[in-house]
Amino acid sequence: MSKIPMTTPIVEMDGDEMTRVLWSMIKDILICPYVDLKTEYYDLGLPNREATGDQVTVDAANANLKYGVSVKCATITPNAQRMEEYKLSKMWKSPNATIRAILDGTVFRRPILVKGIDPYVRSWKKPITIARHAYGDIYKSTELRAAAGSRAELVVTAPDGSVQRADIQNFKGDGIVMGMHNTDASIASFAHACFKFALEAREDLWFGAKDTISKTYDHRFKDIFAEIYEKDYKAAFEAAGIEYFYTLIDDVVARVMRSEGGFIWACKNYDGDVMSDMVATAFGSLGMMSSVLVSPNGAWEYEAAHGTVTRHYYKHLKGEATSTNSVATIWAWTGALRKRGELDGNAELMAFADRLEKATIDTIESGVMTGDLVSLSTLENKRKVNSEEFLRAIASKM
Ligand code: NAP
Ligand code: MG
């Protein structure tokens, strides 16, 4: 059988721990036998970030801007314990934060549904996609502790030197202060990404923020979405028979829990961070949540929503068999291959991505699955397999 050719490379960002182990197995067992895989490889594993002073992360993000499509493995975000474990010279920033700061954009997280794994929320029948704004707010904030008796003010100096000043608090006791920001341009690109994604998926778009309390900050998000919708998307939404609406974040949360699913939920950065973990868990497993960063610069970055599954990796290091779910990482690859195929007019590559996804779902629905799914599945003839057996079962389905 001849392999499917590729013209443009995909930017490949390798990562850490158990997902790094799965990464090479996925390539060896499920991709390279069928595709003449072209990638430009960047090793974002923590040892190489340390060795390059984290330059590799910046280089990878710039390559993503150059080529358009990347696939990223989960990576460790160092904390104090990791400093010790990996003998780091510095507590390197989260690679995802570095990449998002360069690409800008919106992260879309979508659960992968299979028969036999029912969402904890009984009414949910279709996937709920969370669109997380990936720029600014508390993720790019400045924080200080304030001693008792301190006065905190907000100061904005315009280019002409004029100053806006507002009191934050006169501290009677010790306290804390934070300054955060966003930009009209980033909010607008968030809005465009959401409207475009909804049109492509033919699903309604819901957006919630707290404009009643945050009358300037959150209100700006609401207004920018409304202006862009009216001007650029309303007609297309009506033609597609889909809807956009804005309501308070509390109201959105209540509606989400009563819904059937099948819509895109646009979230500000923090809401998206927190709610995507809730939605992923309620749909079944973190191992079944796919994720893509859509940049206004025309770049796509595909990854799994979960982390490096450290506990499983330590077992793996001891020589014990693991049963780690590779589905979301497979979806990162299929997403990247399909998008590469779409951009290059490579229909064979797109069809391969579809086939690999179908083989993966068929494998699980036939009862062969990893441990995290076995405990959730209602199928009668289910069988727990190890990480590698799962990939081999998919290959034989293909
Ligand atoms: P995690 O790696 O997502 O794992 C949390 C737990 O969820 C696991 O211990 C496991 O539960 C379960 N789980 C997650 N993915 C699974 C899968 N594919 N198959 C089976 N079970 C799975 O999160 P974490 O433990 O908080 O973080 C570990 C490391 O990942 C940290 O260093 C963090 O910085 C990093 N991280 C990276 C990213 C990213 O690169 N995008 C995102 C989040 C975290 P059981 O142990 O109970 O089986
Ligand atoms: Mg989170």
Image (cartoon, grey):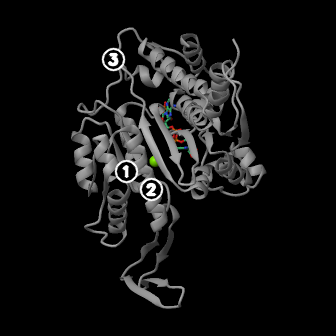
The amino acid pointed to by label 2 is: Phe
Relative depth, front residue between 283 and 302: 302
Image quadrant assignment for residue 41: top right
For label 3, the residue is: 378
The amino acid pointed to by label 3 is: Thr
The reply, left or right, for residue 344 in relation to residue 251 is: right
Q: Secondary structure at mark 1?
A: strand
The reply, left or right, for residue 67 in relation to residue 366 is: right
Whether tag 1 and tag 2 are in contact, CB under 8 A, the answer is yes
Relative depth, front residue between 350 and 274: 350
The reply, left or right, for residue 242 in relation to residue 74 is: left
How far apart marks 1 and 2 lie (CA) works out to 9 Å
Task: Count how many numbered circles sit on residues in the image.
Answer: 3
Name which residue lies at 41% across and 77% down.
174
Q: Secondary structure at mark 2?
A: helix
Q: Is residue 322 visible?
A: yes
How far apart marks 3 and 2 lie (CA) works out to 38 Å
Name which residue lies at 68% across and 18% down.
33
- Specify few, some or many for label 1: CA neighbours under 10 Å numbering under 14, 14-19, or 20 or more: many
Name which residue lies at 65% across and 47% down.
64
Q: Is mark 2 within 8 Å of ligand 2?
A: no
Q: Secondary structure at mark 3?
A: loop
The amino acid pointed to by label 1 is: Ala
For label 2, the residue is: 190
- Specify few, some or many for label 3: CA neighbours under 10 Å numbering under 14, 14-19, or 20 or more: some
For label 1, the residue is: 266
Image quadrant assignment for residue 362: top left
